[in-house]
Image (tube, grey):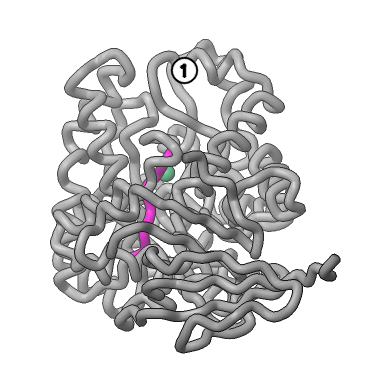
Amino acid sequence: MTAQTNETVIHAGQLLAEPGQPPKRGQSVRIAGDKIVAIADSFVDPPEGARLIELKNSFVLPGLIDCHVHLTAQLGPGYRLRLVEDSDPKTGLDGAYRARLTLAAGFTTVRDVGARKPEVIFALRAAVAEGKVPGPRILCVGATLSPTGGHAQIYGFRNDVCACVQSASGVCDGVDSCRKAVRAQVAQGADAIKFVATGGVLSDISAGVDQQFTTDEIRTIIETAHHLGRRVSAHAHGAAGINAALAAGVDSIEHGSFMDDESIRLFLEHNAFHTPTIIAGMTVLEMAREGGVLSAAQSEKAFTVGEHIKAALGRSYKAGVKISFGTDMGVGPHGRNAREFGYMVEAGMTNADAIKAATVSAAELLDRSELIGSIAPGKSADIIAVDGDPLSDISELERVTFVMARGVRDQVDA
Ligand SMILES: [Zn+2]
């Protein structure tokens, strides 16, 4: 019996090791444990005892990264009732199921940017990291920071029911309270901080999509998070909120629907990322048209925002703003994340740049470039494959045929 090593060799028909560079034909990737150790310019035989994974007829690329998901949520018919019916353990198990769908779709890292019950997402992050639950590596913000009456709160139930379902820990008003809220999320284990610079579509309140936190509060949140070594993302639709967050040094604007010329200037000046989440805009627009899921207050905002997100990406991309891939899944259906690529290309991105947004650029925004985003020695063995070339047909990424996360092959359903 041959002694098994923990080594694997992948033969890649085409290998896009570093998105942004051209792919190469006939490459081998050597993996030991959860790390990539070498890339060879030909098909090399695996060393004694190592496994061989034959992907000679496939296009191989780094595992995809989604910078904006909500694993503990799923919008759809009856979702408001589930807020009060589901226990926290049920929410966690649902999150585990969605993590599995996300991994099978080729996403080996996600950033969860807001959970109603932060301890649920922290537990899921740990279970995945320990290899007990299949899923993408999870970075998370804990609770989204919101002012009282702001976007990340829950509305429309009896007051005592609202109090029980909303995440109180993310609510802060005034600079002292905002500073403390950032520190509280970090103390609980947040990898990054997210706050609502403006209103949003899905809060069931007619409060528009303009600036919500004051400029002073925004500055305090960003400064406090940066002092603690955490990146900061701002949920923002209206231009005033986008610009206040950018001027204060935010690392990414999520959505960015109504950015103006000043926003573009600030994005470039501060080297900030735009995470468009077009699929979320399209999903809520469709729900508003069809009826049955969104309330009147939500639908009104969905009609306002919907298509604008795609136009916003066209604008930021053309101006040279750095783009990070994000879907806001939890709004749309988990596991369909790769549909976003098609929308990004419709907005004007090249296929190569859309792939870069979900690999190299996403890793940069997440401050994890040394670990993820490309296939290179020393990096995590996060590798996926598709049958055709996504540089000529971006929809190939919606049909992932092979997934390896941290050196472990996921058994993708046939
Ligand atoms: Zn979101």
Residue 366 position (above or below residue 92): below
Residue 273 position (above or below residue 297): below
- Look at the image and give the residue range highlighted in magenta: 324-329
Look at label 1 and name its amino acid. Answer: Arg
Give left or right: position of 170 versus 286.
Answer: right
Say which residue label 1 marks. 80
Q: Quadrant location of residue 116?
A: top right
Q: Quadrant location of residue 22?
A: bottom left
Name the chief secondary structure element in magenta: loop
Position in image of residue 4 (x %, y %): 80, 68
Residue 62 position (above or below residue 346): below
The N terminus: image quadrant: bottom right
Residue at left offset 37%, top offset 24%:
204
Residue at left offset 44%, top offset 52%:
401
Give left or right: position of 278 versus 224.
Answer: left
Q: Nearer the viewer, residue 2 or 209?
A: 2
269 within the magenta span: no
Give left or right: position of 243 versus 70.
Answer: left
Give left or right: position of 56 versus 231.
Answer: left
